[in-house]
Image (cartoon, helix red, strand yellow):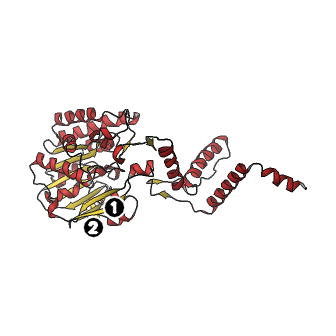
C-alpha cells in the first residue's frame, strides 16, 4: 500500500473530522462566491464590510483582525438561518426563557431585557426631564406630555417569572410630578391601557403599541383637551398580516406568532419637509399618510407617516394647530389627530437638529404634545433639544 492510500485510510478512522472539514471548506467556498450584504433587513442593522489593512503595526494588525472577525460574523453564508437555528436549539432544547436580549413571555409576548437604567441613561433621563420641564415653562398651558409605558408594565403576568425588570412606574410617577410642577399636563395612560389589556393593544413581536393601543391613549388625550375623538367606525380599517417586529429580529423564536398592523384609509396629505439652516420648513414632498410599499418589506411599521422624518406636516379636518414632538410611538397615533386639527406638525429630533421656539412662534400652535415611549424617553440623546430656547 502506497503512502497516499495509507493517508486516505487513516483519515477514514476520523469520519467526524472529515465531515466537519468538508463542511467548513464548503462554507468557506460559499462565502467567497456570495456577495457581501450591506444591510440586514430582518435585524434592521447595517452589516460590517470587508476591512482594509492600513497600518503594518501591532495596533494596526489588532484593529484589522478585530474588524475582520466582526466582518466574518456579519457576512457568513446563511447568517439569518444560522441565527434562527441557534434560537431553536436554545429555546426548544435548552428551554431558555430569553434569547438575543429578549424575554420570552406567555401568550407569545416578547419583552426587552431591561433590568435597570444603563449608565448612559442615568445621564440622559435627567437631561430629557429638564428639557421637557423647560419646554413647559416657556409655553405654559400648552404642553401635554404622554409617555407610553412598556408592555411589561401592562402585562406583568406575562413576563417570565422572577425577571427583575426596571420599576418603570416609579420613574413615570416622578416624570408626572415634574411636568405638572413646570406648568404642563402629564397624560398618564397606564390605567387606561390596563383597563383594555384583554384587547390587542401591544404587538407580540415588536416594541410598539398597536393602532388600537394608540387609539385608547388618544381618546384619553381628547378627554384631557375636551376634543371629540376620531371615530374608527366612520372609516375603513385596513390590515397588513405577517408583521414580525424588532423583538423577533433579536429573538428569532421558531414558534413566534406574527402580528397584524391595522390602519385607516384616510385621504389626508402629509408633507415631508427639507429644513433650512434656521430650522424652518423649505421645499417638501407631499404624499399620503402611509407608505404602503413598506408593507412589502420586513419593517412594515415604517409605513406609518413614512417613517421618522425630521419635520412633517399633516393636513387635518379639524381646526387649529398642534405640534407633536415624538418618537416612533406617535407614528400610528398622529393620524387620529386629523379629526381635531387643521394642521398637525410632527418633529422627530433624530432628524431635526434645531431649536423649536421659532417654529412654534411662526405657527402659533394651540397645543404642543410630547409623545414618547418611556423606553426611548430615558435614552434619547436628542430630546434635550426641546429644552433649548431660540
Question: Which quadrant of the figure has residue 386?
Answer: top left
Residue that appears at 27% across and 67% down: 287
Q: Residue furthest right?
A: 1
| Of the pair 240 and 46, the residue shown nearer to us | 240
The image shows residue 324 at horizontal and vertical percentages of 22, 51
The secondary element bearing badge 2 is classed as strand
Residue 60 is left or right of residue 108, and the answer is right
The image shows residue 382 at horizontal and vertical percentages of 34, 45
The image shows residue 43 at horizontal and vertical percentages of 45, 53
166 versus 383 height, above or below: above
The crowding category of the residue bearing disc 1, from other C-alpha atoms within 10 Å (few below 14, some 14 to 19, many at least 20), is few
From the image, tell me which residue sits under label 2.
287
Residue that appears at 27% across and 34% down: 171
Residue that appears at 12% across and 42% down: 141
Taking the image as drawn, is residue 289 in sight? no
The crowding category of the residue bearing disc 2, from other C-alpha atoms within 10 Å (few below 14, some 14 to 19, many at least 20), is some
| Of the pair 152 and 382, the residue shown nearer to us | 152
From the image, tell me which residue sits under label 1.
241
How many angstroms separate mark 2 from mark 1 (CA)?
A: 24 Å
Residue 297 is left or right of residue 349, and the answer is right
Residue that appears at 63% across and 41% down: 59
The answer to whether mark 2 and mark 1 are in CB contact below 8 A is no
Residue 49, labelled with which disc? none
Residue 221 is left or right of residue 262, and the answer is left
Q: Which numbered mark, 2 or 1, is in the foreground of this view? A: 1
| Of the pair 178 and 254, the residue shown nearer to us | 254
The image shows residue 362 at horizontal and vertical percentages of 18, 54
Question: Which quadrant of the figure has residue 32?
Answer: bottom right
Amino acid at each position: 500500500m502506497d503512502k497516499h492510500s495509507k493517508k486516505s485510510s487513516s483519515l477514514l478512522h476520523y469520519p467526524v473530522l472529515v465531515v466537519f472539514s468538508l463542511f467548513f471548506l464548503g462554507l468557506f467556498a460559499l462565502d467567497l462566491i456570495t456577495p457581501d450584504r450591506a444591510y440586514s433587513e430582518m435585524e434592521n442593522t447595517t452589516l460590517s464590510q470587508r476591512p482594509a489593512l492600513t497600518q503594518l503595526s501591532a495596533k494596526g494588525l489588532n484593529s484589522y483582525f478585530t474588524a475582520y472577525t466582526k466582518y466574518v460574523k456579519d457576512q457568513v453564508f446563511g447568517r439569518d438561518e444560522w441565527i434562527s437555528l441557534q434560537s431553536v436549539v436554545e429555546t426548544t432544547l435548552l428551554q431558555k426563557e430569553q434569547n438575543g436580549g429578549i424575554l420570552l413571555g406567555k401568550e407569545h409576548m416578547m419583552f426587552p431585557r431591561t433590568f435597570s437604567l444603563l449608565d448612559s441613561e442615568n445621564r440622559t433621563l435627567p437631561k430629557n426631564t429638564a428639557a421637557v420641564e423647560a419646554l413647559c415653562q416657556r409655553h405654559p398651558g400648552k404642553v401635554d406630555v404622554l409617555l407610553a409605558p412598556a408592555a411589561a408594565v401592562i402585562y406583568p403576568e406575562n413576563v417570565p417569572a422572577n425577571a427583575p425588570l426596571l420599576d418603570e412606574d416609579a420613574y413615570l410617577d416622578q416624570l408626572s410630578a415634574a411636568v405638572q410642577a413646570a406648568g404642563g399636563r402629564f397624560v398618564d395612560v397606564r390605567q387606561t391601557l390596563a383597563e383594555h389589556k384583554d384587547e390587542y393593544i401591544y404587538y407580540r413581536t415588536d416594541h410598539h403599541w398597536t393602532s388600537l393601543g394608540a387609539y385608547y391613549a388618544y381618546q384619553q388625550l381628547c378627554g384631557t383637551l375636551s376634543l371629540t375623538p376620531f371615530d374608527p367606525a366612520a372609516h375603513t380599517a385596513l390590515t397588513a398580516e405577517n408583521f414580525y417586529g424588532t423583538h423577533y429580529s433579536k429573538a428569532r423564536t421558531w414558534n413566534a406568532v406574527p402580528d397584524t398592523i391595522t390602519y385607516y384609509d384616510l385621504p389626508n396629505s402629509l408633507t415631508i419637509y427639507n429644513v433650512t439652516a434656521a430650522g424652518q420648513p423649505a421645499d417638501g414632498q407631499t404624499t399620503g399618510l402611509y407608505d404602503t410599499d413598506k408593507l412589502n418589506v420586513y419593517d412594515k411599521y415604517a409605513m406609518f407617516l413614512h417613517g421618522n422624518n425630521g419635520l412633517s406636516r399633516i393636513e387635518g379636518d379639524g381646526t387649529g394647530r398642534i405640534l407633536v414632538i415624538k418618537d416612533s410611538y406617535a407614528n400610528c397615533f398622529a393620524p387620529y389627530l386629523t379629526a381635531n386639527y387643521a394642521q398637525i406638525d410632527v418633529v422627530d429630533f433624530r432628524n431635526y437638529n434645531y431649536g423649536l421656539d421659532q417654529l412654534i412662534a411662526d405657527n402659533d400652535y394651540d397645543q404642543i404634545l410630547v409623545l414618547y415611549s418611556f423606553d426611548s424617553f430615558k435614552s434619547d440623546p436628542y430630546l434635550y433639544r426641546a429644552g433649548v430656547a431660540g
